[in-house]
């Protein structure tokens, strides 16, 4: 075989691996093309980004990192670690400045001691190069803690046997003040396109879009805001620079003068890639993170509404050129129902629509299911829920974005001995799900239990408790073959002083395995 043929085969195989081709064909002995089944292999490298958790001096943050055990073929070595990144402030003109350097400059002026300030700067640089949180082996979670407004934004990567399914949870407690609440999020990987329905520019809210760049080179991002009548005017949401290995928080209300209580943010990058998430602080109802909605789709599932939710608000956005007419249903413990008075929702193209569903769960945990009305052309949408527990001065909020079903496996870290609830939703056919609770960060033995989720229902369970648990633990969800699609979410409730503080994280597939086309061992059939 000549080198040109070999090169073409190598290029084709590489392209198939990168672009996700499902099959690769090669001729058999008769010359006919035969489809080659792709091999399912563990990912070799993955990355994560965690934004700066809080601006409150009394914030307490826990970072928990974990990789599930038992991924075959991923090798015997590997590393996984997250390091501190610089927090860079953005002004309304899109300019940025290094908050770390500003803090060091202020410290120098206050102390009037050049030598000490220089030493502090050297320590800061050293801390950024050293892993803040390092994972040593699959199946055993690790954690680290930080206090106050100086808790760092983190960037990092995992490779080898620690890459498949690697996840990190960031959990922050703020007991008092305007940002009071339990803020939780699963640190995510970088991308170039994000949708956030459920944001607000009204005076009672402070919504910060956090942009984190994992790379050494700068990225440039655009932020568009859409209200009920379309895009909100802004001259400063374009061309926002995000320096390399830095995190930039952008206050949403500084991007537009228009008041929009229910809005949708679209984050895209012109160059580079970023991680994006929104931190919400409501002066009446607490604080939490709003993660990006799943990819635009005609059918969406928003899993994990707590049984005692006192108010649920749905915010949806039609991303395409067509309007969307959505059927609104609740998959509860006993089946799927249609909320009285809110049977459908009309969403105009490139506009945000919202509806207050009040206490839609009526004392039973559930999940919202959105689907097209009728059999006509279905328009893609994104959606999220704003969920409230408690009343009056004892309210707390959390957000549930739409999420795709678990294709193979999903994990959420930082579960506690008390307060964790796992919601499993089967919007179509019934499904069986294996749930594995890991060892604790301080010790213990894993526990496994299998659940059956009836068709069209949501099953809310307490994850199986690890034996001899010390510290916090991770929960891994794996739908068994032959059942319907499963969507999942985890609620962590840590009440404090009468406030039902809680946070909800959805569980998208961890993408720990990828399809790679198999190459024919005998390439001589392709000729010389």
Image (cartoon, helix red, strand yellow):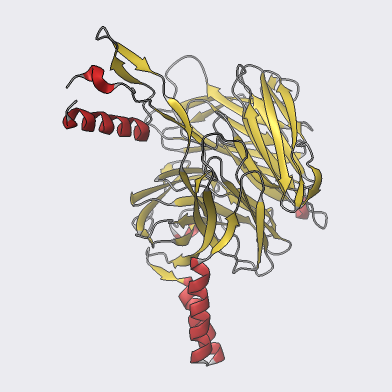
Q: Nearer the viewer, residue 156 or 452?
A: 156
Q: Position of residue 115 (x, y in %)?
A: 50, 90
Does residue 361 appear anywhere in the picture? no
Total numbered labels: 0
Is residue 1 shown left or right of residue 307? Answer: left
Is residue 196 shown left or right of residue 397? Answer: left
Q: Quadrant of residue 266?
A: top left
Q: Nearer the viewer, residue 139 or 262?
A: 139
Identity of the residue drawn at 33% across and 30% down: 16
Q: Where is residue 268 in the image (x, y as percent from the top left)?
A: 38, 47
Q: Where is residue 208 in the image (x, y as percent from the top left)?
A: 52, 57
Is residue 489 shown left or right of residue 125? Answer: right
Quadrant of the rendering where the C terminus is positioned:
top left
Identity of the residue drawn at 74% across and 40% down: 446
Q: Which of 476 and 230 is in front in this view?
A: 476
Quadrant of the rendering where the N terminus is positioned:
top left
Is residue 470 shown left or right of residue 39? Answer: right
Q: Which of 360 and 99 is in front in this view?
A: 99
**Does residue 468 lie above or below 3 as drawn?**
below
Does residue 363 appear anywhere in the picture? yes
Q: Position of residue 329 (x, y in %)?
A: 63, 24
Q: Which residue lies furthest to the top in this view?
A: 30
Identity of the residue drawn at 54% across and 84% down: 107
């Amino acid at each position: 075989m000549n080198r040109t043929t070999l090169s073409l085969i190598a290029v084709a195989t590489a392209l198939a691996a990168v672009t996700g081709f499902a099959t690769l064909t090669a001729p058999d002995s008769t010359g006919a093309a035969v489809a080659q089944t792709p091999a399912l292999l563990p990912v070799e490298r993955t990355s994560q980004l965690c934004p700066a958790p809080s601006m409150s001096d009394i914030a307490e943050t826990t970072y928990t990192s974990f990789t599930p055990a038992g991924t075959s073929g991923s090798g015997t070595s590997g590393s996984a670690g997250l390091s501190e990144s610089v927090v860079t402030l953005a002004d309304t003109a899109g300019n940025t400045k290094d908050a770390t350097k500003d803090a060091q400059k202020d410290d120098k002026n206050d102390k009037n001691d050049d030598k000490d300030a220089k030493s502090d700067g050297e320590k800061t640089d050293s801390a950024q190069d050293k892993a803040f949180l390092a994972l040593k082996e699959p199946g055993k979670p690790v954690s680290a803690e930080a206090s106050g407004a100086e808790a760092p934004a983190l960037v990092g990567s995992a490779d080898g046997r620690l890459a498949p399914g690697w996840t990190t949870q960031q959990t922050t407690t703020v007991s008092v003040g305007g940002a009071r609440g339990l803020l939780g999020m699963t640190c995510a990987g970088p991308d170039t396109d994000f949708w956030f329905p459920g944001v607000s520019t009204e005076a009672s809210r402070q919504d910060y879009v956090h942009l984190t760049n994992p790379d050494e080179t700068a990225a440039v991002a655009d932020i568009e805001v859409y209200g009920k009548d379309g895009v909100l005017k802004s001259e400063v949401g374009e061309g926002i620079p995000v320096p390399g290995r830095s995190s930039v928080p952008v206050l949403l209300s500084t991007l537009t003068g228009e008041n929009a209580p229910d809005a949708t943010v679209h984050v895209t990058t012109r160059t580079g890639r970023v991680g994006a998430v929104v931190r919400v602080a409501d002066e009446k109802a607490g604080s939490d993170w709003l993660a990006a909605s799943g990819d635009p789709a005609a059918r969406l599932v928003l899993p994990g509404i707590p049984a005692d939710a006192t108010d649920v608000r749905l915010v949806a956005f039609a991303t395409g050129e067509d309007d969307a007419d959505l059927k609104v249903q609740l998959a509860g413990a006993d089946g799927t129902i249609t909320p009285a008075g809110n049977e459908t929702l009309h969403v105009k193209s490139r506009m945000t629509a919202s509806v207050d569903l009040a206490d839609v769960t009526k004392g039973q945990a559930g999940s919202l299911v959105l689907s097209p009305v009728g059999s006509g052309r279905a328009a893609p949408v994104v959606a999220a829920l704003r969920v409230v527990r408690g009343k009056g001065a004892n309210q707390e909020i959390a957000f549930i974005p739409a999420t795709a079903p678990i294709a193979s496996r999903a994990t959420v870290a930082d579960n506690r001995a008390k307060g964790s609830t796992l919601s499993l939703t089967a919007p179509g056919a019934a499904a069986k799900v294996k749930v594995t609770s890991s060892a604790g960060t301080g010790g213990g033995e894993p526990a496994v239990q299998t659940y059956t989720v009836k068709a069209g229902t949501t099953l809310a369970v307490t994850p199986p408790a690890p034996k001899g648990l010390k510290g916090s633990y991770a929960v891994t969800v794996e739908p068994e073959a032959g059942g319907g699609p499963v969507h999942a979410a985890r609620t962590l409730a840590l009440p404090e002083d009468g406030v039902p503080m809680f946070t909800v994280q959805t569980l998208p597939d961890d993408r720990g395995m990828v399809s790679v086309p198999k190459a024919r061992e005998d390439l001589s059939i392709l000729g010389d």
